[in-house]
Image (cartoon, rainbow, N blue to C red):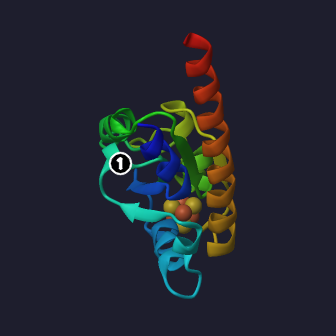
């Protein structure tokens, strides 16, 4: 288990979910994974499996139809985990706020650790947010380890 945790810290995996975005922020996330920005140089990899993910990148406002999937994915991710709201819509509902089929930002349902503003958020901002998320993940893991040491 110790070895697993060690490698998890060095190679955190990302789960990307579009909760109702216009796809603008999602395209910027994909740009981060392209050779130009090469987000993977930080050891992260984009995966489709919540059970192996550490960082949850969410775009868009939460629509009524996506709400249950958002919660389901979040609950399937192991602890500790970090949630990043990408774009104004994920942060507050953005331009869709107040529409009949849309709820507010992501933090109405799950706790958000990093907010990345912008419509759309640019690759530099997203990279910066992911680096912050890595620091937060490391801090959470340290705290969890200390807690488990105390319990012994
Ligand atoms: S913040 Fe802008 S680009 Fe991103 S999902 Fe909302 S409307 Fe689209």
In the drawing, does residue 74 fall left or right of residue 35? left
- Name the one closer to the observer, 140 or 49: 140
Residue drawn at the location 62% of the way across and 52% of the way down? 134
- Name the one closer to the observer, 112 or 64: 112
**Element marked by disc 1:** helix
Q: Residues within 10 Å of mark 1 (few under 14, many from 20)?
A: some
Q: Is residue 117 visible?
A: no
The quarter in which the C terminus is drawn is top right
Judged from this view, the residue extending furthest toward the bottom is 36
Residue drawn at the location 30% of the way across and 52% of the way down? 49
Residue 92 image position (x, y, % from top left): 61, 44
In the drawing, does residue 120 fall left or right of residue 109? right
The quarter in which the N terminus is drawn is top left
Residue 138 image position (x, y, % from top left): 63, 44
Q: Quadrant of ligand 1?
A: bottom right
Location of residue 28 with respect to 142 vertically, above or below: below
Does mark 1 have its CB less than 8 Å from ligand 1?
A: no
Residue 5 image position (x, y, % from top left): 48, 43
- Name the one closer to the observer, 70 or 8: 8
Q: Which residue is mark 1?
A: 52
Q: Is residue 106 visible?
A: yes
Query: Total marks drawn?
Result: 1
Residue drawn at the location 70% of the way across and 63% of the way down? 128
Residue 123 quadrant: bottom right
Residue drawn at the location 49% of the way across and 55% of the way down? 12
Residue 20 image position (x, y, % from top left): 40, 53
């Amino acid at each position: 288990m110790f070895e697993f945790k060690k490698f998890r810290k060095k190679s955190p995996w990302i789960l990307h979910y579009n909760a109702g975005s216009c796809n603008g922020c999602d395209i910027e996330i994909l740009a981060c994974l392209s050779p130009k920005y090469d987000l993977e140089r930080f050891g992260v990899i984009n995966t489709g499996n919540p059970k192996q993910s550490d960082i949850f990148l969410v775009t868009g406002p939460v629509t009524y139809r996506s709400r249950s999937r958002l919660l389901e994915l979040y609950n399937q991710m192991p602890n500790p985990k970090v949630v990043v709201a990408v774009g104004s819509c994920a942060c507050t509902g953005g331009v869709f706020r107040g529409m009949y089929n849309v709820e507010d930002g992501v933090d109405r349902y799950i706790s958000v650790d990093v907010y990345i503003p912008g419509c759309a958020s640019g690759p530099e901002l997203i990279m910066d947010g992911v680096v912050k998320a890595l620091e937060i993940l490391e801090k959470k893991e340290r705290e969890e380890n200390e807690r488990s040491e105390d319990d012994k």
